[in-house]
Each structure stands twice: as C-alpha cells, then as structure tokens.
Amino acid sequence: MKIGIIGAGNIGGNLTRRLTALGHDVSVANSRGPETLKDLAQETGATPVRAEEAAEGAEVVVVTVPLKAVPGLSAGLLDGAAEGVAVIDTNNYYPKQRDGRIDAIEDGGLTESRWVEQHLGHPVIKAFNGTYAQDILDRPLPAGHPDRMALPVAGDDEAAKAKVRALIDELGFDTVDAGGIDDSWRQQPDTPVYGLRAGVDAVRKALREASPQRPADFRY
C-alpha cells in the first residue's frame, strides 16, 4: 500500500519504521524539507518528500504534526491522493503546553479532529493520538495474543475507518470502534483511554467512562 506520512516526529518516525518494515511504500515529510530526512530514509527505505507531495497517490495519509501547524499545511494537500484515501489524524490539543488558544475548540465545542477536518477539507480518522510512540515499535503482538493492546479509532467514514483498523491490526494491535468524530472527545488528552495500555474490553470501558468536560489542564 502507498502511504504518506506528514510529520516525522516520534509517532510519524516510528510509523515510518514499522510500515516500511511491513513492505508498504512510504513517503515521509516534515516541515524542514526532505534533505533533513536522509537518515530516516536510509534507515527505513522510505522516500523523503515535501509535505505537499506526501499524499500523491497515497491510499492512507497520516497527519501527525502539532495541532497549531495544521492551518499552515498546503491547500489542496490531498488533491493527488488515491480515490477513497483514508486520512489518519494523530493530533491532540495542548493549549497551555504547545498550541495556544484555538477558539473553535474552546468556544465552538469542536473536537480537535473535527477542527482538523475543517482545515484539511477531508474526513479524518482519529487514531494513535493516545499511543506512546515507543509502543509502536515495542508492543506489537499477533492477533489473539492475550496481552495484545487495543487502540481506539474514531471517524465518520466507515470505509476509511475499516481501512485504518485493518492497517493497525497489521501493525500488531487490536482496535475498538470509538464512534464518529463528534465522539472523539472520548479519546482526547486526560480521558481514561488516553495512554491506556490494555486490551479491547478495558479500552471499551475507558471510552464509556470518559467525560465530555475538557479537563482544566487542556483548556486555555
């Protein structure tokens, strides 16, 4: 599968490592240009590209940049993607720690992934936002293993969600359908499922126990 990854930080870098190891054709981009990705490309065999080129022909695109950087992504970022492309949003809103105030989230009641959708002009699937980056390398297990971790996956496009869940299964993790993007507050920072290293039943329970009230540490 052709996969574009926009953002080469901890999550983006480790997804590049795993997905190339699984045989996928990965293009990876960051904000500083492809010349800064030579080491990652040499390590993994991924193709370093400019951000506006990462989605070209891709069946899956991972957007894993700081939330405050999303409005700066190129217009038409997904224009060259394959038909039916699934766009994974790994972002979290850290207003005090990194992103500053985003009025549409604070006052408009948008989930952070709905806000990302509006900027990208394309539906997204929220996944990996509460996953420790090192776990992507260290904790994959075969299907059926009793200790296999489960990740929540939210999104409105059922076909795209199915594609993302299949990819996560290939990476070595179970998934739990966390509802639509308007339900994705259940996996935002400081909810019970955020950072949870557990199986399907525990993840479902944690999603049920989430509160829609955004915690004070994650409000501006």
Image (tube, grey):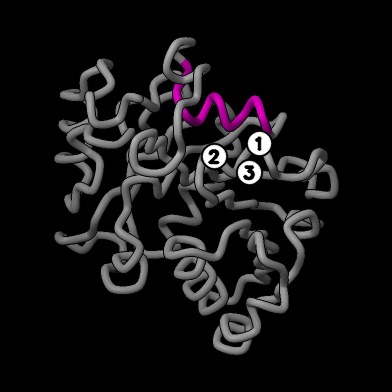
**Residue kind at label 1, given as amino acid type:** Pro
Tell me which numbered mark, 3 or 1, is placed earlier along the sequence: 1
- Do the CB atoms of the residues marked 2 and 1 lie less than 8 Å apart? yes
Residue at image coords 50%, 56%: 167
Instruction: Tell which residue pokes out farthest to the bottom in this image.
Output: 42
Residue hosting label 2: 68
Label 2 residue SS: helix
Q: Position of residue 12 (x, y in %)?
A: 51, 62
Instruction: Tell which residue pokes out farthest to the top in this image.
Output: 108
Residue hosting label 3: 86
- Do the CB atoms of the residues marked 3 and 1 lie less than 8 Å apart? no
**Residue in the foreground of this view, choosing between 203 and 44:** 44
Residue 115 located within the stretch drawn in magenta = yes
Q: Quadrant of the N terminus?
A: bottom right
Q: Main secondary structure of the magenta part?
A: helix
Q: What separation in Å lies between label 3 and label 1 (alpha carbons)?
A: 19 Å
**Residue in the foreground of this view, choosing between 88 and 166:** 88
Residue hosting label 1: 71
The segment highlighted magenta reads 110-119
Tell me if residue 3 comes above or below residue 23 in the rendering: above
Tell me if residue 140 comes above or below residue 108 in the rendering: below
Front position among marks 3 and 1? 1
Q: What separation in Å lies between label 2 and label 1 (alpha carbons)?
A: 7 Å
Q: Position of residue 191 (x, y in %)?
A: 22, 32
Q: Quadrant of the C terminus?
A: top left
